Structure formats: C-alpha cells, structure tokens
Amino acid sequence: MATMFVLLLLVVQVVGLITSISCTTSTSSSAFGTPDLVPSTSTTTVCKEAERIALVEYKKQIIKDPSNMLSSWDQGRDCCSWEGVRCDNRTGNIVGLDLRCPYDLLCLGGEISPSLLRLQHLNHIDFSRNDFYGARIPSFISQFKELRYLNLSGTNFMGPIPTSLGNLSNLQTLDLSDNDFDPYNESSDHQWLSHLTSLQHFVMNGVNFGNSSRSLFLALNKLPSIKEISLSNCELESIPLSIPHLNFSTLSILDLFGNHINFSGCSWVFNLKTLEYLDLSFNLLQYPEFTTFLTYPFSFSGEIRGELNKMSISESIGSLCGLETLDLSWLNITQGLVELGVVFSGCLMDSLTHLHLRHAHLEGDIPDWMGDIKNLKVLDLSDNLLSGSVPSFLVRLSSSLEKLLLLKNELKGTIPKEIGELEELVHLDLSGNQLSGVVSEAHFAQLKKLEILDVSGNSLVFNVSSNWVPPFLLEELRIRSCSVGPGFPTWLRTQHKLNSLDMSYTGITGTIPDWFWNLTTHNLTSNLLLSHNQIEGMIPKSLNFTNMDYLDLSSNRFEGPLPEFHSSKFNSILDLSNNSFSGPIENISSGAQFEIYLSRNQLNGNVPSWLCQRNGLSVIDISENHLSGELPDCGVNSSIPKNLNLAYNNIFGSIPESICSDPISSVQSLQLNHNKLSGEFPHSLKNCSQLLVLDLSDNNFTGSIPFWVGVNLSNLFLLKLRSNSFIDHIPPEISQLKYLQILDLSNNNLSRSIPTSLGNFTAMQMSPMATGWVPLIIDSREAMPLSFRGRQDNYTNSDLSFVKSIDLSNNDLSGLIPEELASLYGLQSLNLSGNQLEGEIPNKLGRLKQLESLDLSINKLLGTIPSTFSNLTFLNHFNVSHNNLSGRIPSGNQFNTFVDPSIYIGNHLCGSPLIEKCTEDGGASRKGPSDQEDEDNEDNEMIWLYIGSLSGFAAGFWTVWGVLVFKKKWRHAYFSRTDNISDNIYVYVVVSLRRMKNKMMPNY
C-alpha cells in the first residue's frame, strides 16, 4: 500500500512537472514568431529602469502622433504594459517594439532615437508605415545583435540602404519595402546580404534595384535558409539567365510582380522544386506609354499601354509538385488554352490551389482541363478575350472552388444552373461580359458561403419569387445594368450582412420600402449605388448615412430636402445629382478627400458658407441649381475645395479676394460659368497657381484680361472666358501656358491684332494622341459644354483630354491671321469668325493636319481659299462666308463633301457647290445683258406671285375667322369640335403607348 502511494505521488509530481514545462513553453511563445516574447501583463514582470528611460527619450523624438499610439507611455506605469512594448516574462528585458501603423495614413512622425541602443535584448522591431521624414536608416540598428525581425516598410526613409545591416547575423525577416532609397545600378554591391546567414524572409517590394539583379540574386543564392524573396515593383530589368550552383533549396515564395523582366531563357525559375508561391505577373518589357515630350503635373487615367512580355510557359512548371499559387497575369502567353493543358498536365494538377491568368491574352472557350485541377480554390481568368459560354464542367470543382473571376471577357449565353452547385464558392464575378437570359433561384441553390456576387454589365434578368429566402448572406452585391425592377427586390431584406450594393441601371421604379432604409442605416457602411433608375419619393429625415464610403442616388426622381450625410472616412463620395431635391444645402459633414455632387436639382438659397470650413473637401459640384447670393468670403489663409463647380446658378457679385489667399492653395478647377458675376478679372485668382481648369464664361465680367494669367496660372489646361464684356487686347503672355489645350475667348469685346505668340502653345503643337492625358479634376460623371466643330456639345472627361481648340470668334479683332498659328500641329478646331480680320488666309494653315473645324466667316479676308486646305483630311466643318474672297473653291478630299453653298456666300467665289462657274483664269463668270434681263423678269414674276399669294391668304383667313368672331354659336360649336378631336387623339396615343409598354415589359 505504501509502495502504491509512493508511485502515485511520483506520477502526480511528473504530471505537475510536465504541466509546468508546458505552461512555460506556451507563455514563452512569441506573438511575433520569436521565442520568449509575450505581452507583459504579469505583475511579477517589471521593466528595467534604464530601458524605461530609453523609451521615454525615444518618445521625445516623436513630433507627430495623431492616433495617440504612445498615449499609454505614462511615467507612472510599468513600461512592459505600454502599447507596442513587449518584455521577456522572466527577465523583464524589453525584447520587442511593435509600433506599426494600422491605419491608411502615416501615424508616428519623428526620428529613431539612439537611446534605443540601451535595449540590447531587442529581437523584434516593427516601425512600418510611420513617417521618418526622408531620413536615412540609422546605422546603429546594426548593433542589435539579437535582432531577428526588422520591418521598416513604408516609413519614408531615403538615401542608401546601410550595408552595416549585414552584421545582423541572427536576422530572419528583413522588410524595407516602399521606401525611396537611392536606386541601385549595375555596379552596386549586394555582398552584405550574403552575411545574413539566418535570413528566411527578404521583402523589398518597391525598392529600385534597377539593373543590379545579377549581383542581387547571386548574393541571395548564398543564403542557406531563404524561404521568401519578394521583389515586386523593383524596376528590375532582368534576372540572371542562369545561376551557378543554384542553392534555392528552401525557397517557397518568389514574387517578381510588376517589373520589366523577360523570362525567356530563365529556366531555373521553373525548376525550383520547393516553390509554393510564384508570381511573375505584370512584367512589361517597355514602360507604359504615359510619358510624352512634356512632364505634366497631372495624373493619367485610361488603359495601361505597354509592350506585354511574350512568354511561353515551360512544360517543366508542371513538375513543381508543391506549387500552390501561380500568377502569370499581364503576360502575353503565346500558347493557346489547349496547349496550356499539356503544361498543366503534371503533378501541378494536384497541388495548385490558386491560378491567376488575368489579362494574359487568352482566347477561345474555357478549356475542359481546368475542371480537373481538383484542389483549385481560386480561378482568375478575367480581362481576356474568352468567348463561348460559362462552362458547366466547373461543377467538378464544387468541393474546392472558392473564388471564380471571369469578368471582362466576351462570354455569351446564359449562366448554367450548375453554378449553383459550387457549395464552397465565396466570390463570383461574371461582370463585363455579354451574358443574357434569366437568373433564377436554382442558380444559387447550394451557394451557402457566397459573400460577393458581381454580374453587372450583362443583360441578365433576375426572376425570383417575392418570398425567396437566399441560402447566403452577401457582403457585396453588384448587379448594375441587369433587369431587376420594376419592384424593389424583397429578398434583400434577409441580407443583414450587406455592406456594399450596386443596383444602378436596373429598371427599379416607385418608392424605396422602409425595411430597405433600415437595412441601409444599420448595415450598408461601404457603398450604396442606386443611380439611373426611376426611384421617387423623399428620403426619411430620420436616416443618417454615417460613415458611408460612397452614396450614389443620382439620376432618379427623389425630392424633398437633402438627406443627412456624415462621414469621417477618407475619400468618401456623395452623389445626389440629377434629382429634384430642393431647399438649402445643409446637414452634410465629411472627412478628408470628400466629394459632393449635387448638380441638376432644385436646390436654392445662398452658396453654403461651410465651403470655407471643409479642408477635406476635394470636389464640390452644385451646378445647375437655383443658388443665389454672393460667393462666401472665406477670409485669409482659407481653403476651398480643390474642384469647385457652381455653374448655371444665379450667383452675383464679384469673386472674393480670399478665394486663393492660402499661400499653398490647392484649387485645381474653378467652374463659375453661366452666373451673374461681375467686376474686373478677379485679381484674387493670381495666387491660384495649381489651377488647371478656369471657366468664367457667360457672366458679366469687364475690363481687360491681365497678363499674369499666362504667368501665374502656368498649369492651365482649359481657359474659358467666353460671353463676357472683356475689352482691350489678348495678352501675348497667354502663350506661356504650355499645358493649355482649350482656349475660348469668344463673344467679348477684344480688339487689336491676334498675338503671333499664340503659335507657341506647347500642348497644341503635338497631336492629340501624343499627349492624351486626363486631368483628374474634371469628374468623368459630369460633361463640360464646349464649342467645337461649329456647335456646342458636352464633352466627358476622357473626350476632353484629347481636344485642342482655339475660339476667338465674335470679338473686334483686326489685322492679319498670324501664320504662326500653323505651328499648332495638334489643333483640331480654330474659330476666328465674327471679327475684323483682313488680308489673305495664310497658306501655311494647310499644315494643320488634325484640323476638324475651321471657321473664318464674317471677316474682311481677301484673296483665295488656299489650295493646301484640300489636304485637311479630317476637316468636317468649314465656313468662310461673308468675306471678300475670290477665285476657285478647292476640290478633292473633304471639300467634295461640303455641299452647302451657304458656307461660301458673301464672297466672289466660284465652283462647286455654288452655281457660279469659274472662268479659265479661275474667276467667277460674269452675266451678259440678256442674262441680266431674264433674271430681272424672273424677279418681277416672283414679286407678283408673292403679292397674289398674300392677298389670297388674307381673304381666306378673314372669311373663316371673321365669321367665328361675329357668330357666337358657330364659334362655340367650332371650338367644342376641335376639343373633342384633340381629346380623342390624346386618349389614342396614351392607350397605344401603354399597350406597347406592356408588350415590352418582361413577365414577373
């Protein structure tokens, strides 16, 4: 019995010992992946005084802490409990500083104090996404001998990367991504990397390694434990075709995204047997065609046009039996889809879980072999030229497929109901195809895990019952341009996790049900887009769109006061344009980079004074409303929105002096056209040095155009001053606006001659496609009116970027047409009509090969129409009427299409389309005496014909209407009869339209 007791006691002691060891091990495990690093919450752990003082001194070097990250660093508290500080639970030494910024914007700002050297036991430093103001990485960091993890990514460090970091022999992770270090070149030495013998993760995304890749990879090849090499967006121009003594035996992650590498001949990349993740995507052999002869101070939009890397995928890739993720997007894959089936026929079919082939120039039907990648979780074939239908064989992936991305292809037909059997599917995107047909409940039968659904941009018709309860809980739904209406889809009331919804262009009519407004208030925190429907009614006053990123209710029939919109989020958007909202503008607040679009409503009252107080406003568009009063004076050092559009209102008075009083004013677009503003050209605009678009047209401004417009507003892209009362001459300094593409000074009282320097507009000297940039300040959702091709049309952002136009019409300009204008080779429209210009039309204008519209009418021009004009093959609008021109009208090319004789009248021209024939010397043939007599007789006959017709009309008119005036009974009978006829016609039209509508409406 005693023996049993002793044995039992020993067992208890052993169990206790094991438990103790287990507890010690678990509490010693690191939150950073390093041992002995734990959050120091134990009361027995107290940090060292010297180390606490070191942290206090470090905090003194921090001059910016907007998120109050260091607010817990209180003198009266144990420093092991401070945020971001980690201590060894046994010794109390500080072993980790995790001060990474979790926000979109930089958090801490300042310097890294050398006082941190007292923390000799540090094995983990993470200062990522903070701001160190362009300083160099402190060399003393290399003295932390125990350091295993160093993350300084996105910290605004500059200068060279210190080679002394090679002394950190215990370092396992090095991340210096997204800093503006000095670029490397071919002679750069990377040997310091080979001393990091413990390094496993080498992350340098966004660091410019240029053409130093050979020495870089040779150094990395010497690291015995390297697992990850991430070099995306590093400006790498190549990688070695071969590496002597290839030693990447432990490499599992290779990320070379976004460089300029030609992988032809780099067979070693496809023979790395331990690879699990391979990203070679977006490698362009040439830089995108963004740069031109100018360095524009603007951003670009539109498709990226670079030479894609033509690549034949090596068949050896099929033997990478451990490869799970393969990304070959944005590569011009030379094999067809059928040939790729051979490449993917090896053990890769068993290991692959993520396949990305976005924008890989793939054509044809989606091949059957893709349904045999049995463990595939993500299939991305978006942005290709795939045709055919969505394949039903994808059902073979029902047990694995989580994400299916087929957007932006040319897929046709209906969506197969087998899609509804992909029970693991989380994300389905079929948007931007040519799919049609009905989407029913069967398409979603087993999609219990679906969170994101995007079928927008197709011609699909949703036909589900009103009491349908979907098996899923969506977070994002985009069905733009599909047929959903006319009723509001009731099944949405079950989607209480929905935070982003796009149902624009879906044919919804009527009012929005209350249950949806409740869903909006409590769940939709990201995007709500219901534009271009026929939704009507008022938005409930109780609603408060708090912290929504994007609210778009534009182009509907909403009425009543504006809803409350309060967002503290960065870059939020509110678009309520093209409705019938009325009343004053209030109850709107925002965070940074906020955009508001309220154009084309019935809003009234004064221009809101809160324009002055919203430093975060980026775009304000309240055009085409009924605003009145004067522009608010914001005071000294004020800030108005970067892009302000108050056009087409009833605003009067002058432009306040304070509009650009801030020395660093960032106003980029100012559209105040079609108001009642007055006074001289606003001197306050002199400080708007960042201005790109200035439109003051159709107001009552007077005085002269100041010379400083061409000096101080040097970034102008568009200058419109038409339909004012400006006088005096056109200042020659305007020609210094090297980015100017659109100049409209028409309908003023400008006089004197046209400055010859106007031929110096740099941007107009290049063809439209050579520049082709888009100023982002003109929002693409709103069109801008522009006189072009002889008429006024509205131009969108993308269209406007390629327009190059000069309009000086309807002024009092005199003198000659400057032949220097012939230097504007990119000019598309030139309108000099309605002036007092004289002399001959310069022959050199025939060099303007891009010219589409030329109007020289109503002047005093002499001579002939230059024969060189027949070379203007793009010309589609031409007018030289009412001048003193003579001679033969040119023929050939575009001139054969100008059949309207009115564009030549008021001259002494001859030839087609005029009836005047040309003589042998090119002049108009003169009429003889007999011809003149016949013409006079014809004129007399026409006069008597007109007199007879008018007499007959008068007699007939009073015969009928005279009786009706004096005969009351007849008058009542006549108008009663006409009323009945008009009523019958109205009823017939309405009934016919209703029948047509019923035939065209789908059955629900």
Image (spheres, rainbow, N blue to C red):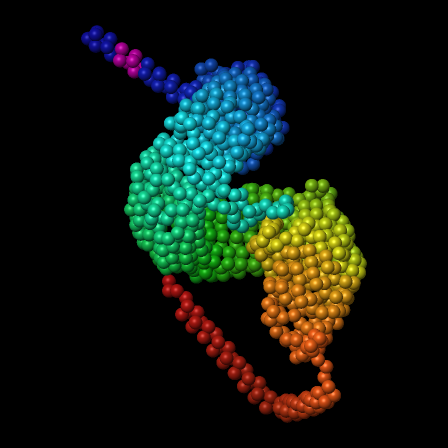
Using the image as rendered, state which of residue 740 and residue 15 is in the foreground.
Answer: 740
Using the image as rendered, state which of residue 977 and residue 480 is in the foreground.
Answer: 480
Residue 178, by quadrant, is top right
819 displayed left or right of 14: right
Q: Verify whether residue 12 appears in magenta.
A: yes
865 displayed left or right of 180: right
Residue 18: x and y, percent? 32, 16
Residue occupying the far left of the picture: 1
Residue 838: x and y, percent? 77, 66
Residue at 47% over, 14% down: 91
- Residue 207, compared with residue 742, is above or below; it is above
In the rendered view of the protein, which quadrant contains the N terminus?
A: top left
Residue occupying the far front of the picture: 920
Residue at 65% over, 92% down: 952
878 displayed left or right of 435: right
Residue 429: x and y, percent? 41, 49
- Residue 12, compared with residue 794, is above or below; it is above
Residue at 50% over, 17% down: 145
Residue 881, by quadrant, is bottom right
Count the marks: how many? Answer: 0
| Residue 74 visible from this viewpoint | no
The residue stretch that appears in magenta: 10-16
Residue occupying the far top of the picture: 2
In the rendered view of the protein, which quadrant contains the C terminus?
A: bottom left
Residue 710: x and y, percent? 73, 50
| Residue 241 visible from this viewpoint | yes
Specify the principal SS of the magenta part: helix
- Residue 213, compared with residue 539, is above or below; it is above
911 displayed left or right of 426: right
